[in-house]
Image (cartoon, grey):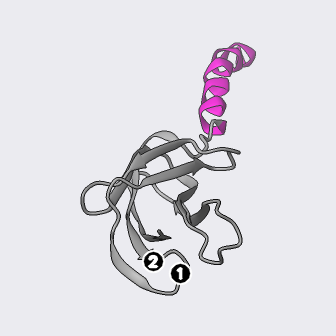
Amino acid sequence: MKNLSIIRLLPMLILLFTFISCEKDAGEGGNSSIYGKVWVRDYNANFTLLMYSYYGQDEDVFIVYGDNKSYSDKVSTNYDGTFEFKYLRPGKYTLYSYSKDSTLVSSALIPTIKEIEITDNSQDVDAGTIDILK
């Protein structure tokens, strides 16, 4: 009789352990968000004179979910430099936007990087300001 009760409970126990062990990685599918702004410092050609400073409109901001090797998504900033990534799960994220190299060593763009962590469901995380040079 005891063996029959254990056999009946076995499928429920397997299902319970399956749900407990299914921890989801960082990425889409949650109800949290990361937001912030992009600040642009616009210099002359040799970076000796700051011409303008302003919130960047239509600047690309990229996000990397967890340990992914390439970017997972990108958004463009709106009229006041604000960006937002929605529907994220708890986990670690890397944000970046491209900037000119003020050392003039290279003409390549370099990333300005921010590391962010969402620690709870339904959390809105302020990433602050990403500063870029133009």
Residue in the picture at 57% in, 53% down: 91
Residue 64 is situated, as x and y percent measured from the top left of the image, at 59, 49
* Secondary structure type for disc 1: loop
Find the residue positioned furthest to the right: 3
Residue 20: image quadrant is top right
Identify the secondary structure beneath mark 2.
Answer: strand
What is the total number of numbered labels drawn onto the structure image?
Answer: 2
Q: Which residues are magenta?
A: 1-21
Residue 73 visible in image: yes
Task: Kindly report the secondary structure that dominates the magenta region of the rendered protein.
Answer: helix
Crowding at mark 1 (Cα within 10 Å: few <14, some 14-19, many 20+): some
Does the stretch in magenta take in 13?
yes
* Category of crowding for the residue at label 2, using alpha-carbon neighbours closer than 10 angstroms: few (below 14), some (14–19), many (at least 20): some
Outermost residue, front side? 45
Please say if 17 is above or below 32.
Answer: above
Q: Which residue is mark 1?
A: 47
Do the residues under discs 1 and 2 have CB atoms within 8 angstroms?
yes
Determine the residue positioned at 47% across, 56% down. 120
Residue 122 visible within the image: no
The Cα–Cα distance between marks 1 and 2, rounded to whole angstroms, is 5 Å
Near-viewer residue (118 or 13): 118
Q: Residue furthest left?
A: 79
Image quarter hosting the N terminus: top right
Amino acid type assigned to the residue bearing label 2 in the image: Tyr
Q: Residue 43: which disc?
A: 2
Residue at 61 percent of width and 70 percent of height = 101
Amino acid at dot 1: Phe
Query: What residue sits 65% from the left and 74% below the top?
Result: 104
